Every structure is written in C-alpha cells, then in structure tokens.
Image: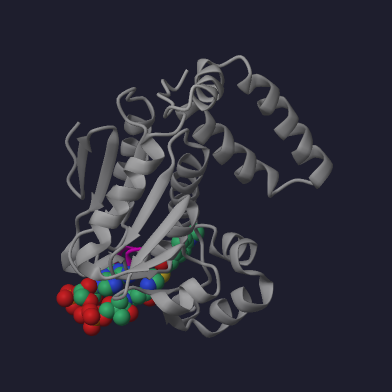
C-alpha cells in the first residue's frame, strides 16, 4: 500500500509510521487521518509486526488538526472529521500491538490526542505538548477532554484545557503525561530499543495487558477484575505460559512465540 502523507517502514517485527507533512508541521488533515486509519489496520493484520512506533518528520510530531482545512468546515463536516479522529484513536487503543509515540517536537491539539492514545510515550527535550484548541474558539475533538484527565487527573487537565498552555517534555514527564524524556538525537534509538525489549515478551500477553488496562480503566473495579480473571486463566492455554515458566525453572531465557 502506498501513502501520500505518511511513511511506513516495517523492519524486524516493528512497524514505524512517520507523519510526513513537515511543511505544515505534520498537521492532521482528513486525508492524513484516513491514511493513518488504513495503516493502523494494515499493521494490525500483518503477522510479522508485533510493535508499532509513531513519530513525525522533521521538527514536529503533530501540530494538531489542520486548521486550514477545519476553518472551512460546516457542522456536518466537523462531525465527520471528529469521527475520523476518534476512529483512529480507538483503532490504536484497541490494537493488539503496543504503540510507542516518539514525540520529536510539537504535539499539540490532535497531536497530543494521538500521543495519548498510544501505550508508551517517549519525548525529546524539544517537545512542546498541549491542547491549545481554546485559542481557536473550539475545544479538543479527538478525545482530549476525556483522555487527558484520565491520564493526569482533572485538576491539571482542566488547567491545560482552559489555558491552552503548552508544556515542555520535562513538565509533561513530571505530571505523568509521558514516560521518558530523551535527547533529540537519541529519540529514535531509545524508542527502537524499547520496542526491541517489548518484542522479546509474549505477544499474547502484551495484547492481553493492553486490553485489560484500556478496558479496565473505564469500568468499575469489580468488573475490571473479572476481565483480569478471564484473561489470566486463558493465559494458561498458551504455549508462552508453558515456555515462560519452563524457562524460569530451567534457568534460561524464555523464547516466546506469541501463541
Ligand atoms: N494546521 C495547519 N497548518 C499549520 C498548523 C496546523 N495545526 N500548525 C502549523 N501550521 C503551518 C503554519 O501555518 C505554517 O504554514 P506557512 O505559514 O509556512 O504556510 C507552517 O505550518 C509552519 O508553522 P509556523 O510558521 O507557525 O511555525 P512556528 O515554528 O513559528 O510555530 C507552532 C509553531 C506550532 C507554535 C505554530 O505553528 C502553531 O501555533 N500552530 C498551531 C497549533 C495549534 O493550535 N494546534 C491545535 C490545532 S486544533 C474536531 C476534532 C479535532 C480537533 C478539532 C475539531 N472536531 C470534532 C470538529 C482538533 C483540533 C486541533 O488540533
């Protein structure tokens, strides 16, 4: 499949998606959202891929939804556009693949929202993160009002949403919005190292864990614990469970097959 606004690389079990509209700081227009939805499905269905990385070309991760395109939208078009964004975030969250965001620069508006839909977030010291939609006379429309408070708590989330202020990577790390701050020249190396580490784990378990956390956080604790009991017991029907425990007892590293 060929894409116009994104670059896709598949290597050693890792699928890397690079948003490639640097002339507009990788702003998400309708076409880019559609391509992203397609590539997320493509990686999902590719049995050679076990981890995905999302990053941006040149100085931005994603500077938000495309303001030039949004400026002309009517209510119906805005609804469809918002639907596309939500579809993308849900595909990422519901994916069997762990998604790592490598935030190389601006992650604003829709960029921050896409980052938050990922499972692990590494950011360069150059990153600037925020939800500045209020400055445009709108509010976040790809899940920002919902995911941000779930991640950092409602007090800090409301501050960022109501002021439209952007924060740097260090502050994002301090408030628990990202996992790690990395020097810009080391960002991809560190991200790939993390992806490689996850690749050595059981792919069955990475998908189970992702599903449990993402579903469990939105439901009550007893129901969430019931989900955990179900997939915990299902784990004992996998080859990876046998391999993991046998390897421990034989004092060797496990070789998981994702089965
Ligand atoms: N959209 C379109 N073009 C953008 C853009 C964006 N979000 N961000 C930057 N650009 C373009 C600039 O217009 C400029 O184009 P030219 O002038 O060269 O033609 C080029 O990228 C370089 O940008 P700057 O010259 O501004 O670069 P600087 O380094 O000076 O400044 C900046 C970088 C990131 C601080 C600045 O570009 C900026 O403030 N950008 C806008 C950031 C922003 O407000 N992002 C949030 C967008 S709103 C919805 C669903 C979702 C959403 C809304 C509705 N519905 C359900 C309806 C989501 C909304 C958003 O994400």
Color encoding of the figure: one colour
The image position of residue 9, as x and y in percent, is 20, 40
Can you tell me which quadrant of the image ligand 1 is in?
Answer: bottom left
Which of the pair 22/215 is nearer the observer? Answer: 215
Q: Quadrant of residue 2?
A: top left
Q: Nearer the viewer, residue 98 or 135?
A: 98
For the N terminus, the image quarter is top left
Magenta segment: 65-69
The relative height of residue 91 versus residue 237 in the rendered view (above or below) is below
When the figure is inspected, residue 201 is found, relative to residue 142, above or below; the finding is above
- The one nearer the camera, 10 or 143, is 10
Residue lying at 23% horizontally and 33% vertically, measured from the top left: 12
Residue 136 visible (yes or no): no
Q: In the picture, residue 184 is in which quadrant? A: bottom left
161 sits left or right of 22 in the view: right
Along the viewing direction, whichever of 81 and 92 lies nearer the viewer: 92
Q: Is residue 57 magenta?
A: no
Q: Mark yes or no: residue 217 visible.
A: yes
Residue located 19% across and 60% down the image: 57
**Which is the main secondary structure of the residues drawn in magenta?**
helix
The image position of residue 214, as x and y in percent, is 61, 45
Residue at 39 percent across and 50 percent down: it is 100
Q: Quadrant of residue 148?
A: bottom right
């Amino acid at each position: 499949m060929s894409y116009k606004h994104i670059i896709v690389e598949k290597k050693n079990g890792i699928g890397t998606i690079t948003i490639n509209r640097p002339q507009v700081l990788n702003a998400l227009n309708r076409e880019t959202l559609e391509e992203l939805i397609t590539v997320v499905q493509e990686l999902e269905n590719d049995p050679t891929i076990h981890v995905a990385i999302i990053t941006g070309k040149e100085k931005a991760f994603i500077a938000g939804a495309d303001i030039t395109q949004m400026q002309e939208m009517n209510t119906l078009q805005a609804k469809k556009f918002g639907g596309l964004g939500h579809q993308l975030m849900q595909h990422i969250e519901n994916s069997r693949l762990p998604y790592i965001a490598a935030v190389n620069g601006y992650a604003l508006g829709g960029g921050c929202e896409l980052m938050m839909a990922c499972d692990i977030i590494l950011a360069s010291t150059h990153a600037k993160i925020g939800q500045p939609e209020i400055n445009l006379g709108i509010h976040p429309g790809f899940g920002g009002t919902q995911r941000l408070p779930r991640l950092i708590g409602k007090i800090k989330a409301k501050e960022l949403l109501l002021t439209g202020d952007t924060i740097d990577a260090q502050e994002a790390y301090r408030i628990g919005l990202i996992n790690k701050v990395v020097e810009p020249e080391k960002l991809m190396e560190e991200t790939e190292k993390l992806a490689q580490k996850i690749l050595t784990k059981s792919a069955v378990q990475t998908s189970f864990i992702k599903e449990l956390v993402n579903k469990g956080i939105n439901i009550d604790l007893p129901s969430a614990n019931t989900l955990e009991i179900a997939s915990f017991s299902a784990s004992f029907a996998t080859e990876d469970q046998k391999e993991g425990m046998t390897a421990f007892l034989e004092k060797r590293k496990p070789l998981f097959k994702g089965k």
